[in-house]
Image: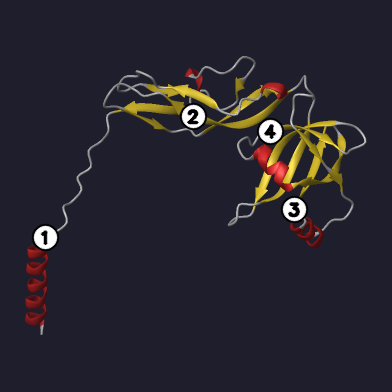
Amino acid sequence: MADNPTLQVEKRTDFGKGFARRARVADKIPAVLYGHGTDPVHLLLPYHDTFLLVKDNANAVISLKGLEDPAMVLVKDIQRHPVKRQIMHMDLLLVKADEKVDVEVPIEIIGEPKSGLVANQDLLNMEIFAPVIAIPEKIEVSVDGLEDGVVLSVADIKLPEGVEAKTDPEAIVLSVTTPQEVDIPEAPTAEEETTEAETEEETEESAE
């Protein structure tokens, strides 16, 4: 656990919306820790330090201090305010260094296909089964030099050692195509707008 980022946490015994609201005012995040057959433990996490750990890694593995026994946890769920996007609550899963876990990670397209072509990404995230101590923050897929008509599925993606795909292997990740030209109608000139207005007036007069 020494290599994991560390958070100093507090156990909490009070519950309810009122307590949670007061905790957030005090820059604390209500959280629950569970896993390995243990009873759930309710915690308070320091907001700023926690935010920094999870802002670029939703599957962060963290060592907790402040409990009776040191604990290594995986961030399993983050609940955010629907408008302000502030962290409102977190679920933490108790894990061990020698186990694997199911997580979802983003897919990032890198490189450029052959000149004049574009890569259309169909799958944004992939479910994987990965070692706790080696969860990739993202899965990179290179499109360097790919030709028109190439289609890559989950089965075609090379994953880091020890990582298995849980997403359907036939799911399409991306396709390489020629950009489609879109005809954008030209804006009418001032003369055309005047003619259209006169036509509308004549139509209205005829109707009267």
On residue 133, which mark appears? none
Q: Separation of disc 3 and disc 2 at Cα?
A: 33 Å
Q: Residues within 10 Å of mark 2 (few under 14, many from 20)?
A: some
Q: Which residue is mark 4?
A: 60
Q: Is residue 4 left or right of residue 203?
A: right
Please name the amino acid that badge 4 sits on.
Answer: Ala
Q: Is residue 205 left or right of residue 10?
A: left
Q: Which residue is mark 2?
A: 108
Q: Separation of disc 3 and disc 4 at Cα?
A: 20 Å
Q: Separation of disc 2 and disc 1 at Cα?
A: 44 Å
Q: Is label 2 in a helix, a strand or a loop?
A: strand
The reply to whether dot 1 and dot 3 touch (C-beta < 8 Å) is no
Say if 193 sits above or below 186 in the image: below
Q: Separation of disc 4 and disc 1 at Cα?
A: 57 Å
- Residue located 74% across and 56% down the image: 24
| Residue 173 screen position, x and y as percent | 45, 28
Say if 113 sits above or below 51 in the image: above
- Residue located 23% across and 42% down the image: 182
The reply to whether dot 3 and dot 2 touch (C-beta < 8 Å) is no
Please name the amino acid that badge 1 sits on.
Answer: Thr
| Residue 104 screen position, x and y as percent | 61, 32
Q: Which residue is mark 1?
A: 189
Q: Residues within 10 Å of mark 1 (few under 14, many from 20)?
A: few
Tag in front: 1 or 3: 3
